[in-house]
Each structure stands twice: as C-alpha cells, then as structure tokens.
Amino acid sequence: MVIFWISAPAAEAVSAFALLALSHFAGAVPPGGCGDRALPTDLSSLRAIVVQTPAEVAGALPRLPALGANMIVTHAAPDGATGRSARAAGLGYTAWMTTREIEIARYDPAVARSLLAVPNLSAVYYEDESAVEGYTSPEAQRDAYTFLKELLPGTLVLHPLRLDPIATDAGYLDAVFRPQYTDALVPYFYPVGT
C-alpha cells in the first residue's frame, strides 16, 4: 500500500511513503465485499492520496486518478458530497473522525443516520483529538471501533499507529497499542512524511 500526501497546491504530492500491509489487512474485507463502498478486493494494491486540507478536496478529486490513486483519504468527517465525487472519479473514500464525533453519533440517531447515508465510504480512521496525537486511550479505541463496526459493518475502521513514540516512550505500546481496535495496522511517523 502506498500513500501520497497532498498539500496546497493540490496538484503536488509533497511527500510519499510506503506503509506496511500486514497479512491480516486483506482479511479485513468482509465476506461479500463492502456493499456500495468502493474498496479494492486486493488491499495490497491500495494507492491512497491524502488531501489534508478539507478545502482542497473538491479541486483535487478529479486529478487523483491520473496520479495513480484508487482511494482518497481526507482529514475531515465523512460527507455525502465527497463520497459521491469520489465515486464519480472512480475512487474509494476514507474519512477521518474524532472519538468525540463517534461518541455523538453513538447517542444521536440523526447523526448515525447521516453517517449511514454517506455513499462510497470505504474506511474511517479515528483519533482522540483531546489527547496527544497517537495516544488515544484503549477505552476510547474500544468504544470508537466497536460502535463504528456495529454501525458500518462493511467499512474498514482504522486507528493509525504513531511509530516515533515506540522509540522514545518505553511504555507506549503497552499503554496505547491495541491491534484489536483497528482493521489494519496503519503505522506512521509524526510529523507525517518524516
């Protein structure tokens, strides 16, 4: 799996890095696929481009297939317009949610219904915006993952693993790393691209 990061101007990929695609990643696709959610059946062929700035998404989407992408990843909550545009461009769609947004959806049926209505949502990655990046508590991971899998069973639910604290914080993996609360190991360095 290869991920490219785009920042303004949206046509330029400013850094690229390969992520580990573990053998269990391919097993994350549920039997029968993901319904209307676009997801390559061979996830080792996933080529995602991350558009970090929400205002850049609409302008970048039509250009991503020419860059070799088959997935757009946004740093914004799931929305129908992006899902429809990604589908029209032949791309899968991965959106970001905070644990707070997930908790709201858990208790507000209208918010949950709006998530269900997002077309083409292939994956959601989540983080606790109130914690230091990469330090989402195990409890918050459990709650977010469990709810999203119940609500969106055909969607990959991902919790990115920040790699740099593994070297600098001896207790990091024991305190934070919970592979059971992600459908795939998605490691990254912070700041992204380093």
Image (spheres, grey):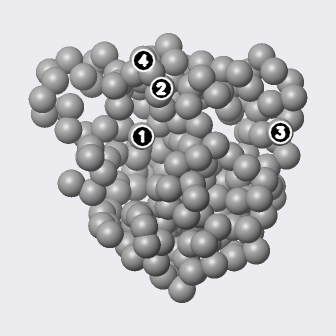
Bin the neighbour count of mark 2 within 10 Å (Cα to Cα): few under 14, some 14-19, many 20 and up.
many
What's the amino acid at mark 4?
Answer: Ser
Are the residues at dot 1 and dot 3 in contact (C-beta closer than 8 Å)?
A: no
> Tag 3 or tag 1, which sits nearer the N-term?
3
Q: Looking at this view, is 15 or 172 the one in front? A: 15
Q: Amino acid at mark 3?
A: Ser
Give the residue displayed 53% in from the left and 35% down from the top: 126
User: Which one is in front, 96 or 60?
Assistant: 60
Q: Secondary structure at mark 1?
A: loop
Q: Which residue is mark 4?
A: 137
Q: Percent position (x, y) of residue 171? A: 20, 17
Within 10 Å of disc 4 (Cα), the crowding (few <14, some 14-19, many 20+) is: some
**The N terminus lies in quadrant:** bottom left
Q: Nearer the viewer, residue 141 or 114?
A: 114
Residue, disc 1: 160
Three-letter code, disc 1: Pro
Which image quadrant: the C terminus? bottom left
Is residue 117 shown left or right of residue 101? right
What residue did someone put label 2 on?
128
- Contact check, label 3 and label 2, Cβ < 8 Å: no
User: In the image, what residue type sits under mark 2?
Assistant: Asp
The count of marks equals 4
Dot 3: within a 10 Å radius of its alpha carbon, few (fewer than 14), some, or many (20 or more) residues?
few
Q: CA distance from mark 4 to mark 1?
A: 13 Å
For marks 1 and 3, give the one nearer the viewer. 3
- Marks 3 and 2, the one that precedes in the sequence: 3
Give the CA separation, mark 1 to mark 3: 24 Å
- The residue where tag 3 is placed is 114
Q: Earlier in the sequence, mark 2 or mark 4?
A: 2
* Above or below, comparing residue 34 to residue 47 in the picture: above
